[in-house]
Amino acid sequence: MKSLAELEAIRQKTLSKVGTRVEGEDEIRVVVGMATCGIAAGARPVMLKFVEEAQKRNLKNVTVSQTGCIGMCRLEPMLDVIVPGKEKVTYVKVNPDMVSRIVAEHIVNGHVVTEYTIGAAEGK
Amino acid sequence: MRDLSMHVLDIVQNSIKANAELITVSFTRDENDLLTFTVEDNGCGMSAEFLAKVTDPFTTTRTTRKVGLGIPMLKQSSEMAGGSFSLTSEVGVGTTISASFDLKNIDCIPMGEICDSLLTLVILNPDRPEFVFKAKSPKSEAYFDTRMVREAVGGISLNESDISAWMKESIDEEFKPILEV
């Protein structure tokens, strides 16, 4: 393992930021489908891209978590963006390039990327 | 599954579902390029009866449908390339699953980004279970333990961005030379 001493510095830095973190009601949740079907379709790079974007933009109110298979394996990788007080939005057949746009438009600016949603995919 | 890294991510989900507290994922690469991938957990385990039929794709514990492909596909991936597969389990003690891959065999699946899979496991399960990752080749060894990271950061979640960045570096630095060549 890398030197654990570096973690002490990270700990101090993180503790000073934790106070400014938005907790509870402003928390935006991103839930990625990570069952066998999701993983095989490429959920991992999508999930890591979200983590990377959140880090790059210093978004403190976004948590990324996983869920299992919800039964629409042909639309994987799928993910939900849950903004408090708004209806849940489900994006389908997501790839890492689409993640940048979802973060910029939906998470940061509050505009749903309609063309990537399950409604648009199934309406065709 | 297109590569081994996806199997890694997928098979460990079984241990998480089995409520394991500690999951050890190890890779041993010998001088003949035979890679053995093992996941050992202290989860709920399986009965002998269930164990006997778990490599059947029509066996699953979930209730939403009747197929479970994770284990059968891992078995297939290893056996089609001249590797071997084993699974032992005891109720209340835990499960050990192991699959080997002859990396020189033309039918062997690529290894893929195993380091990304390991990191993903920790980021998506920041509170529990604890993970130990090990890799060993004739030339070097790699080790990663979430319990040590947790102790060093004292109560901060492991999916905090600066900590996940540190973990990524730590895993990449040691495991990549063994697993992604």
Image (tube, coloured by chain):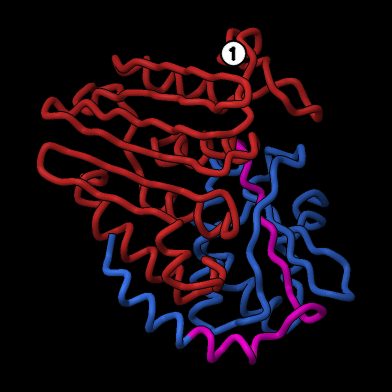
- The magenta region covers A14-37
| Chain letter belonging to callout 1 | B
Magenta residue check for B20: no
Magenta residue check for A26: yes
Q: Which chain is blue?
A: A
Q: Is residue B144 left or right of residue B42?
A: left
Amino acid on which the number 1 mark rests in the picture: Leu
Up the image or down, B37 lies above or below B160; here it is above
Task: Say which quarter of the image contains residue A7.
Answer: bottom left
At 41% from the left and 81% from the top, the residue drawn is A10
Camera-nearest residue between A31 and B85: B85
At 19% from the left and 25% from the top, the residue drawn is B104
Task: Say which quarter of the image contains residue B8.
Answer: top left
What residue does disc 1 label? B51
On-image quarter of the N terminus of chain A: bottom left
Point out residue B58 in the picture as x, y percentages from the top left corner. Answer: 67, 15
Image colour assigned to chain B? red
Point out residue B130 in the picture as x, y percentages from the top left corner. Answer: 51, 50
Camera-nearest residue between A9 and A58: A9
Up the image or down, B12 lies above or below A89; here it is above
Task: Say which quarter of the image contains residue B53.
Answer: top right
Point out residue A18 in the picture as x, y percentages from the top left corner. Answer: 60, 85
- Under tag 1, what secondary structure? helix
Point out residue A112 in the picture as x, y percentages from the top left corner. Answer: 76, 73
